[in-house]
Image: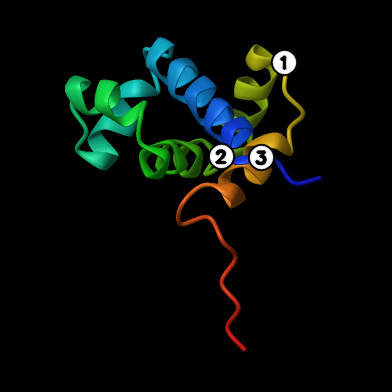
Amino acid sequence: MTLSRDAAETVGLKALAWLAANEDLLPVFMGATGAAEDDLRAGAEDPAFLGAVLDFVLMDDAWVMAFCADSGLDTETPQRARAVLPGGAQVHWT
């Protein structure tokens, strides 16, 4: 099932909010990306930034499961949302 662009952005926003509320994981994200608090606020309106947030969450199955449990989402929803946002298309090497 493919998500609409709006639905994918909503999932990205939920992931950003979940990440911002996670005092253990937020510093890891900010350190890995170099993002500052102002960048988080501005990024909430940027589909490419939301895609990057989903990329980060998708790096660890435990993070995906925790995010989805807290957000009431199916565990495959973040990956489907990521595919819709800028930079999320699958690369075909053939």
Pick the residue in front: 11 or 62: 11
Q: Which residue is mark 2?
A: 60
Mark 1 / mark 3, whichever is N-terminal? 3
Identify residue type, mark 1.
Gly
Residue drawn at the location 49% of the way across and 17% of the way down = 18
Pick the residue in front: 16 or 63: 16
In the rendered view, tell whether residue 94 sits above or below residue 56: below
Q: Secondary structure at mark 3?
A: loop
Q: Residues within 10 Å of mark 1 (few under 14, many from 20)?
A: few
The residues tagged by marks 1 and 3 sit, at their Cα atoms, a distance apart of 18 Å
Identify residue type, mark 2.
Asp
Q: Secondary structure at mark 2?
A: loop
Q: Position of residue 75 (x, y in %)?
A: 73, 32
The residues tagged by marks 2 and 1 sit, at their Cα atoms, a distance apart of 18 Å
The numbered disc on residue 4 is 3
Identify residue type, mark 3.
Ser
In the rendered view, tell whether residue 77 sits above or below residue 16: below
Residue drawn at the location 22% of the way across and 33% of the way down = 35
Position of residue 32 in the picture relative to residue 93 (left or right): left
CB under 8 Å between callouts 1 and 3? no
Mark 3 / mark 2, whichever is N-terminal? 3
Q: Secondary structure at mark 1?
A: loop
Q: Nearer the viewer, mark 2 or mark 1?
A: 1
The numbered disc on residue 72 is 1
Residue drawn at the location 35% of the way across and 22% of the way down = 26
Looking at the rendering, in which quadrant would you find the C terminus? bottom right
Residue drawn at the location 53% of the way across and 20% of the way down = 14
Pick the residue in front: 21 or 49: 49
Furthest toward the right, the residue is: 1
